[in-house]
Image (tube, rainbow, N blue to C red):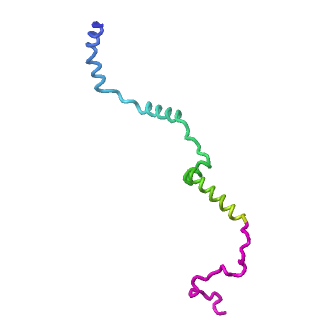
Amino acid sequence: MNDERREDAGLEPFFEAARAHPPAPSAALMAAVLIAAEVAQPAPRRVPPMARLRDALGGWPALAGLAAAAAAGVWIGTALPAALPGAGQGAYLVDVAPDLAFDLTGGF
């Protein structure tokens, strides 16, 4: 073991000189490495349209609220209300500000 260290000690100045001035890689080598890295890189995953819509609307909680509001709107829109007693008399129509009435006929 000691013999090997003595032999390596004679080579140490040469190793130090090589470490002081490391060779720079050539432009062709760097271009080849970059091309190989680009080829090896996986393509980006394609995002499905529904995932993009979900993300644009704010995620699953927002979609759940939107679905609940849509279901309530369909339910309210299709459920026919029971006939109100006296609704045909106009008792439920109230003019809040009669002074602000406009003459839409223009006096013709």
Q: Is residue 7 placed above or below 96 in the rendered structure?
A: above
Place of residue 86 in the rendered image (x, y in percent of width and height, measured from the top left): 71, 78
| Image side of residue 30 versus residue 108, left or right | left
Q: Position of residue 2 (x, y in %)?
A: 27, 7
* Above or below: residue 27 compared with residue 15: below
Name the residue at the bottom extreme.
107
The quarter of the picture where residue 100 lies is bottom right
Look at the image and give the residue range highlighted in magenta: 80-108
Q: Residue at x 60, y 87 (%)?
A: 102
Q: Residue at x 58, y 82 (%)?
A: 96
Residue 46 at x, y = what percent? 59, 43
- The N terminus sits in image quarter: top left
User: Taking 1 as reference, is 95 left or right?
Assistant: right
Please state which of residues 103 and 71 is positioned toward the viewer in this rendering: 71
Query: Where is the C terminus found, in terms of image quarters?
Result: bottom right
Which residue is more in the foreground, 54 or 3? Answer: 54
State which quadrant residue 73 falls in. Answer: bottom right
Instruction: Work out which residue is located at the far front of the displayed protein and give it.
Output: 85
The prevailing secondary structure element of the residues shown in magenta is: loop
Given residues 33 and 53, the one toward you in this image is: 53
